[in-house]
Structures are given as C-alpha cells and as structure tokens.
Image (spheres, rainbow, N blue to C red):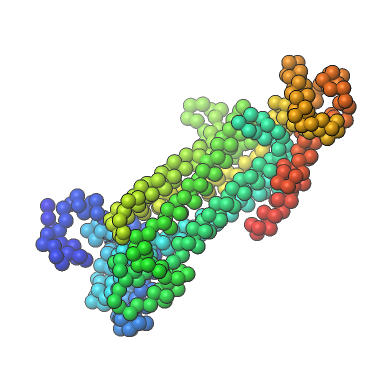
C-alpha cells in the first residue's frame, strides 16, 4: 500500500510508507506529551536565530506568534494530531505552517529532530525530577508527623522478621525519612547533571550557521550548552539516571508498603489504615484490604522494568542517534506516572494511618526482646566479659522459655541460680520502656534521640 510521500522528509521518496511502517515508526501517540517542551525549545531557537541574524525579525516574530497559537490549540484540546506526521516535532511544525505559512519552514534552520527531541525530553525529565522532589518532601512530612506523635511508642524491632529488640515507632518512621532523603538527593544530583542543553548540536556534527548556543541554553534554564555535539544527540543518561533514582525510590516505597501490609493484618494489628485507604472484599464482609499498599509494593516492578528496558535499548548503540532511541519515552513516562501515583498514595496512607500503641507495646516485650539489656546489665554491673554475659543470659532465656514466661517474670532466686551476682536492680532494666530509653547512642532509638531527629527534620522540611 502506498500513498503520497511524507511532507517533511519525502523529497527523495516517490511513494509513501507502508501502513505498518507508519505504525512502527510513529511516536505521536506518546510523544505528544512533549508538546509544551517542544514549543519552548522552538521559541528559544527562533529567538536565537533572529538575534544572530540567521532569521529576520519579522519571520521570528511570525514563528513566535504562530507557536503560541499552536500551544493554545494543544492546551484547548483542539489540535488534530496526525500519525502520518510521525511525531510531535513534525506535527507542530506542520501546523505552524498552516497557521503562518512560509516562515514556518525557516524554523528548522541549524537544527535537527535529533537535538530537538533531546532538548524536549531533557526538559520533561527535569520537570519530573522537580515533581518527585516535591512529592518526596510531602511524604517525608507525613512520616515525621507520625514520628513526632509516637516518639516514645514502643514496638518490636525486627531482624529476620523475628523480634529482636524493642524500638520506638518514631524511630521506625524516621528510618524511612532517611531513605527518602537520599532519594531526593539522587533526583537532585541527576537534575544537576542533566541540566545542559543539547540544542544546536543539530543532526550530530553541529552547524555551519553562526548560532548562539549559550543564548538558547539560558532561555531554557540550562546551565550551559553540552560540549560535544555527538554526545548531545546520542546521550540518554539523563533518562536512565531518572529511572535509576526512581527505581531505588520505588524499592523504598515497596518496603514500607510491605510493612504496612504486615502490620495491618489481624495477626499483627500494629496499625489500622483508614477507610479512605482500604478496600472491602466482594465476598468476605469482614475484610479490610490494604490494596493501595499492595499496589505501591508492586510498582517497583514496572519502574525497575523501565530502567532495565532503557538500559537494554541503549546498550550497544553506535553513536549517534538511532531510531532505537525513540523507545526511551514510553518507559520514562510510565515510570514517572507510576512513581508520582505511588508517592501520592503513600503520603495519603501514612498521613491517615493509626498505630495501635498497646498492641505494639505488648508485642515488643514478647520473644525475650530485652535479653540484650540483661546481658548489657551483667557487663556493666557485674563486670562480666560480654561473651560470658551472653552465655548467662542465654541460660536464663532457656529457663524462661521452658516455663513459658518472659524474662522479667523470672524470680531473683532463679536468676541467681545462674549467676549469684545478679541483684534485684536488674528488673529495672528489663522492661521495654527502660530498654528503649537506655539506647541513647547517636542514631539510637531512645525517645530523646528520636525527638531530636524529629526537630531536625521539621526544620529541614519547613
Ligand atoms: N520521534 C523521534 C524520537 O523520538 C524524533 C527524532 C527523530 N530523528 C530522526 N533522525 N529520525 O526519537
């Protein structure tokens, strides 16, 4: 099947593309999301062409006004996107031609779709870094609010998902704040590195026109023009860094989700998710399902998948542009959309959830969680080497376990049968509240340390 050749590049073609060729080649169905960035790039380019005398002021002015008209059509939803015109760049240019006529054809002077798409996509990803930063800050605030309320609520701390030592709710919430702060700094670093302008690299080699790349870089908020034209059109590191940062962030959200799922079960009952963030079952009336948490837990799959997919697309590509690179956008769009959705849902869920203080405290005491405190006491008070204290405590734990009781329930006589030096003072160190209060080392779980960290984060997140 043939039809007339492409209006933009069809000069050397007698016939148009096969319908399936058109289908595999076109990107307009997804790259229409770059419309705003494409128009911003074109406006900067046209203004520079006029300033350098490459275009007349009249032509540049016509282009500027025409682009604004096209932008308003796109924003109003009246713009007719065409698959025959392949992508957003040619769709916009073709419409510009309809609106302003001949000067539209001069816009592409000293430019190529290769640097054009690199500019558009960089601008889009840069915006997403900023959006992720905002969303992360909001989630961190929600976690800090939880931490402030529960700075001294005792809960079990786990290793191997076995009760290990008592910790505080606030401390646990702030662990995620630390993780998310690293995510923010990863997005900030990526943004910093990507903020260079590819515009003016043209197809791959630069241009013979006397362009001013500094001017277009500045107009688009880039720190500087990219120094190598070949690199400028073939680099997608910025998208990969965004996906890498998104993957790590999504992994963090997945871990938090998993805890919310476990903690809201009837077996744990550490917390209750609000009605707004729970769903019912169509058959089991008693159910309150943590669907949002489960979906966030799963989002890492597609986000990390996007990262792997784009790495694989880029691997082995010779310099410079190859059409393979058109496969970059859907991955990034999908990852960005889902990361933002996951962050927003997590923020809502964390803001609304209620920890069950009593249940957590009871659980914190189970499983001989203060055994380390007993061993530490033996070291401090009896002067035992830690290894020996560990052994004494181990014998006491076995004794308690055999009787089906907890460590503080052993009698003093029983304790002394294992080590005669033990005194009644020891009982003041065995409760879970005492245990957490004693862990005042920097970064430790003691409420006083948690409150200090809450204050620091509140200052930082103002
Ligand atoms: N739609 C293309 C893309 O997304 C634009 C660049 C096309 N360049 C080319 N030489 N065919 O990659």
Please state if 364 lies on the left or on the right of 240 as rendered.
right
Position of 105 relative to 124 (above/below) = below
Q: Position of residue 297 (x, y in %)?
A: 50, 39
Q: Position of residue 4 (x, y in %)?
A: 13, 61
Instruction: Establish if 184 lies above or below 104.
Output: above
Q: Which image quadrant for residue 394?
A: top right
- Residue placed at 44% from the left, 45% from the top? 304
Q: Nearer the viewer, residue 145 or 352?
A: 145
The number of callouts visible is 0
Q: Is 19 left or right of 206, judged from the image as shown?
A: left
Q: What's the residue at 60%, 40% (across, down)? A: 274
Q: Residue at x 77, y 31 (%)?
A: 386
Q: Which one is in front, 288 or 231?
A: 231
| Percent position of residue 213, x then y | 39, 74
Residue 68, quarter of picture: bottom left
Front residue of 271/283: it is 271
Find the residue positioned furthest to the top: 402
**Residue displayed at 72% across by 37% down:** 154
Picture quadrant of ligand 1: bottom left
> Do we see residue 306 in this rendering?
no
Q: Residue 76's x, y, as percent?
A: 37, 63
Q: Which quadrant, please, contains the C terminus?
A: bottom right
């Amino acid at each position: 099947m043939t039809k007339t050749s492409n209006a933009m590049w069809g000069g050397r073609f007698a016939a148009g593309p096969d319908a399936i060729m058109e289908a595999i080649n076109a990107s307009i169905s997804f790259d229409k999301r770059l419309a705003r960035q494409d128009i911003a790039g074109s406006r900067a380019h046209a203004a520079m062409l006029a300033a350098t005398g490459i275009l007349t002021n009249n032509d540049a002015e016509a282009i500027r006004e025409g682009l604004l008209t096209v932008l308003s059509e796109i924003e109003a939803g009246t713009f007719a996107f065409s698959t025959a015109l392949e992508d957003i760049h040619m769709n916009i240019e073709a419409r510009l031609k309809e609106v302003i006529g001949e000067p539209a054809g001069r816009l592409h002077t000293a430019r190529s779709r290769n640097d054009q798409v690199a500019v558009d996509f960089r601008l889009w990803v840069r915006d997403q870094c900023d959006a992720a930063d905002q969303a992360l800050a909001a989630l961190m605030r929600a976690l800090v609010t939880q931490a402030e309320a529960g700075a001294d609520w005792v809960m079990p701390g786990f290793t191997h998902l076995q009760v290990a030592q008592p910790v505080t709710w606030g401390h646990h919430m702030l662990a995620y704040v630390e993780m998310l702060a690293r995510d923010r700094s990863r997005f900030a670093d990526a943004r910093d590195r990507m903020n260079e302008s590819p515009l003016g690299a043209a197809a791959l080699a630069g241009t013979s026109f006397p362009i001013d790349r500094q001017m277009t870089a500045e107009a688009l908020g880039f720190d500087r023009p990219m120094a190598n034209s070949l690199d400028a059109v073939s680099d997608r590191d910025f998208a990969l860094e965004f996906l890498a940062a998104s993957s790590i962030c999504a992994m963090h959200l997945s871990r938090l989700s998993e805890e919310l799922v476990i903690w809201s079960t009837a077996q744990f009952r550490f917390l209750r998710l609000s009605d707004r963030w729970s769903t019912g079952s169509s058959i089991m009336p008693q159910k309150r399902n943590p669907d949002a948490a489960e979906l966030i837990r799963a989002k890492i799959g597609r986000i990390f998948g996007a990262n792997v997919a784009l790495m694989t697309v880029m691997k082995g590509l010779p310099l410079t542009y190859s059409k393979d690179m058109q496969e970059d956008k859907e991955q990034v769009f999908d990852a960005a959309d889902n990361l933002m959705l996951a962050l927003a849902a997590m923020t809502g869920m964390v803001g609304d959830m209620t920890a069950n203080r009593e249940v957590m405290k009871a659980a914190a005491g189970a499983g001989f969680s203060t055994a380390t405190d007993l061993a530490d006491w033996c070291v401090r008070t009896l002067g035992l080497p830690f290894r020996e204290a560990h052994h004494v405590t181990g014998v006491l734990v076995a004794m308690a376990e055999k009787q089906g009781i907890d460590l503080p329930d052993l009698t003093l006589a029983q304790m002394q049968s294992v080590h005669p030096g033990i005194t009644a003072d020891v009982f003041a160190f065995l409760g879970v509240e005492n245990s957490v209060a004693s862990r005042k080392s920097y970064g430790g779980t003691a409420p006083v340390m948690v409150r200090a960290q809450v204050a620091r984060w509140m200052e930082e997140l103002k």
